[in-house]
Image (tube, grey):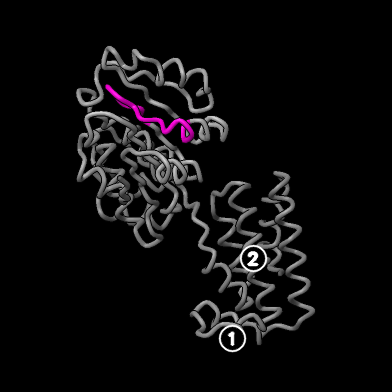
């Protein structure tokens, strides 16, 4: 049996996470390790038994399965096993489980996948059990995710504070929101959460690719570099951003890709409109520049931040 949920719908339907079957394989694939932790913390221990013995997926071997799951005395004491980072189970062990048509009796084999991957898909198709997939929120569901995490961490956010967080950080990144909420919880305790103080604790670090691409396409270079300089962003965020800018500028350089599409999105229409403001030489120069900045970000060159600031100060492209 297989089902899928958003994080908030799953917890709402399962405030105490428990399997529907009295025994067998119970697998949960969470798109994010923080969501996985929330789910595991809500396990109903009475349902799984007192002894939910943990083991890492990478430590699961054929010998372990033979000794613990295929022996005659399987779960004689009614115990169960919790396999953490189940995505670490090797293909050899997976093939063995399928070959033996592994059927757990008298207890549970709980498989927790902390990120997506083919193994969960394979097992859900090949072995009987209960398989639950917790999907990543859609990009427009940032507030739902923030509200969900706030509830789990018991942080009551005023509406203006939650709005600021959604604008300041990547609302699709569960780890960023989780970190911000823990910072707020640490600094405010049970006090009223004040927006200005939150701004002092959590700086803006959200890179809105399309906003920046539009600024650059409009040749508003001063605004582009100023706003990029104002963000508290990591090398990895900048590497991804400059890689996006390379692709974006290349589409402006060669708009023929749009002719192959039946209907153009607003993004494609914007590219075509803005490309008319540029010469091919200008675009080639900018593509090379973004590639160089991407390399600096990838190598974690500390002068990258100085480079960005210098571009803003000098007001250059």
The percent position of residue 215, horizontal first and vertical second, equals: 57, 72
Which of 16 and 311 lies nearest the eye of the viewer?
Answer: 16
N-terminal of the two: label 1 or label 2? 2
Residue 104 in the magenta stretch? The answer is yes
For mark 2, give the secondary structure: helix
Choose top left, top right, bottom left or bottom right for residue 281: bottom right
Q: Is residue 139 above or below residue 203?
A: below
Q: Which residues are magenta?
A: 97-110
* Mark 1 vs mark 2, CA separation in Å: 17 Å
The residue drawn where x is 74% and y is 83% is 279
Q: Is residue 99 above or below residue 200?
A: above
The percent position of residue 197, horizontal first and vertical second, equals: 36, 44
Crowding at mark 1 (Cα within 10 Å: few <14, some 14-19, many 20+): few
Q: Which residue is mark 2?
A: 245
For mark 1, give the secondary structure: helix
Quadrant in the picture for the N terminus = top left
Crowding at mark 2 (Cα within 10 Å: few <14, some 14-19, many 20+): many
Query: Which mark is on residue 155?
Result: none
Quadrant in the picture for the C terminus = bottom right
The residue drawn where x is 41% and y is 46% is 125
> As drawn, is 273 to the left or to the right of 86?
right
Mark 1 touches mark 2? (CB < 8 Å):
no
The residue drawn where x is 52% and y is 83% is 264
Q: Which residue is mark 1?
A: 273
Which of 135 and 24 lies nearest the eye of the viewer?
Answer: 24
């Amino acid at each position: 049996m297989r089902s899928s949920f958003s994080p908030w719908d799953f917890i709402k339907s399962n405030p105490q996470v428990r399997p529907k079957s009295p025994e067998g394989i119970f697998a949960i694939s969470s798109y994010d390790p923080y969501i996985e932790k929330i789910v595991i913390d809500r396990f109903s221990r009475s349902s799984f038994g007192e002894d939910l013995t943990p083991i890492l997926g990478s430590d699961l071997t054929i010998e372990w399965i033979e000794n613990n799951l295929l022996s005659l005395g399987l779960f004689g004491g009614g115990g169960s096993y919790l396999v953490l980072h189940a995505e670490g189970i090797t293909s050899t062990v997976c093939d063995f489980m399928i070959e033996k048509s592994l059927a757990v009796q008298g207890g549970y084999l709980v498989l927790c996948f902390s990120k997506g991957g083919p193994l969960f898909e394979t097992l859900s198709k090949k072995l009987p059990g209960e398989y639950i997939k917790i999907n990543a929120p859609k990009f427009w569901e940032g507030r739902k995710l923030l509200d969900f995490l706030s509830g789990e961490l018991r942080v009551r956010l005023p509406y203006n504070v939650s709005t600021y967080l959604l604008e300041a950080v990547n609302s699709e990144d569960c780890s960023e929101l989780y970190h911000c909420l823990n910072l707020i919880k640490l600094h405010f305790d049970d006090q009223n959460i004040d927006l200005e103080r939150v701004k002092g604790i959590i700086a803006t670090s959200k890179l809105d690719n399309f906003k920046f691409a539009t600024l650059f396409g409009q040749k508003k270079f001063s605004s582009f570099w100023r706003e990029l300089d104002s963000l508290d962003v990591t090398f990895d965020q900048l590497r991804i951003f400059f890689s996006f800018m390379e692709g974006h500028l290349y589409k402006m350089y060669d708009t023929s890709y749009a002719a192959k599409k039946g209907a153009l999105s607003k993004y494609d229409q914007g590219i075509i409109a803005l490309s008319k403001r540029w010469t091919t030489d200008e675009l080639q120069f900018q593509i090379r520049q973004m590639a160089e900045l991407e390399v600096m970000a990838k190598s974690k060159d500390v002068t990258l931040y100085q480079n960005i600031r210098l571009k803003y100060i000098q007001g250059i492209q």
